[in-house]
Amino acid sequence: MTINYNRLWKLLIDKGLNRTELKRLARVSTNAIAKMGKNEPVAMETLAKICAALDCGVDDIVEMKTDNGGK
């Protein structure tokens, strides 16, 4: 499975926020933000905190694709 956080980075741009501000607003660790910057998996709790801070859903910040073309 491939995880992609490009939707999150686009949302931050649209809201005029940077990664440091996201870390502060969502109260998540620097390590979590770094992992997301490398498209690595993070805990669902982290995603929930970010969604609460940005008032959005998980599908607004992360895209997941299976490695076999979605089948």
Image (spheres, helix red, strand yellow):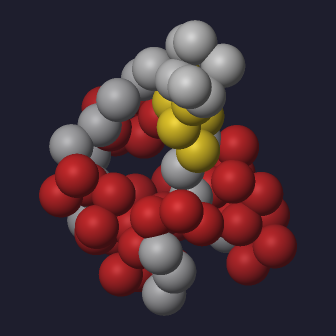
Q: Position of residue 33 (x, y in %)?
A: 42, 40
Looking at the rendered image, the quarter that the N terminus falls into is: top left
Looking at the rendered image, the quarter that the C terminus falls into is: top right
Q: Position of residue 19 (x, y in %)?
A: 56, 52
Total numbered badges shown on the rendered structure: 0
Above-or-below relation of 44 to 41: below
Taking the spot 71% from the left edge, 66% from the top edge, the residue there is 11
- Furthest residue to the top? 68
Q: Position of residue 38 (x, y in %)?
A: 54, 21
Taking the spot 21% from the left edge, 43% from the top edge, the residue there is 43
Q: Position of residue 69 (x, y in %)?
A: 66, 19
Taking the spot 41% from the left edge, 80% from the top edge, the residue there is 53
- Furthest residue to the front? 71
- Furthest residue to the bottom? 55
Q: Is residue 14 left or right of residue 19?
A: right
Taking the spot 45% from the left edge, 64% from the top edge, the residue there is 58
Above-or-below relation of 16 to 62: below
Foreground residue, 67 or 27? 67
Q: Is residue 3 left or right of residue 8?
A: left
Foreground residue, 4 or 1? 1
Q: Is residue 29 visible?
A: yes
Q: Is residue 25 visible?
A: no
Give the quadrant of residue 15. Answer: bottom right
Above-or-below relation of 5 to 59: above
